Image: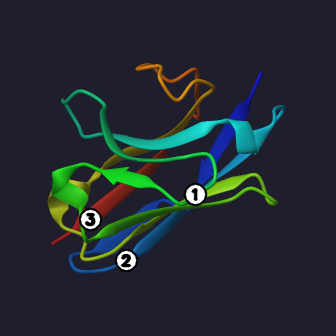
Amino acid sequence: QVQLVESGGGLVQVGGSLRLSCAASGGSFSTYVMGWFRQAPGKERKCAGIINLSGDSTYYVDSVKGRFTISRDNAKNTVYLQMSSLTPEDTAVYYCAAKKSVYAKEFDYWGQGTQVTVSS
């Protein structure tokens, strides 16, 4: 069982930057594919990006490409989401998630989420 705890959310102005962290415990962190998801008010939760086990391969949804960067530190059991050039459309609750199988569509474990609000 993996426990995930996000931190780093908050209020930021348009064009600003923010770094989210997700600390994992209770499992072998380096054996989990990690993802960042976000859910805007009144909308479905969607994937923002995914990082592979070693951290040398990432995937981003088109809307965040070039602005968001996912990284991981397996020694610290932590995954990060660096966000820049933020817009009001990035306002959402951000969740990190973990899955054991690289082939699985669904993620197995989820954090509680952290709120990011971008003000204009």
Q: In this view, does 37 lie above or below 58?
A: above
Q: In this view, does 65 lie above or below 54?
A: below
Q: Which residue is drawn at 81% across and 36% down?
A: 28
Residue 38, picture quadrant: top left
Give the CA separation, mark 2 to mark 3: 10 Å
Q: Residue 17 shows which numbered tag? A: 2
| Place of residue 59 in the rendered image (x, y in percent of width and height, measured from the top left) | 35, 50
> Which tag, 3 or 1, sits closer to the chain's start?
1
Give the CA separation, mark 1 to mark 2: 22 Å
Which residue type does callout 3 highlight?
A: Val
Which of the pair 45/69 is nearer the observer? 69
As helix, strand or loop, the secondary structure at mark 3 comes to strand
Which marked residue is nearer to the observer: mark 1 or mark 2? 1
Circle 1 packing at 10 Å, graded few (<14), some (14-19), many (20+), is: some
Disc 1: which residue:
55
Which of the pair 55/36 is nearer the observer? 55
Disc 3: which residue:
118
* The N terminus: image quadrant: top right
Give the CA separation, mark 3 to mark 1: 28 Å
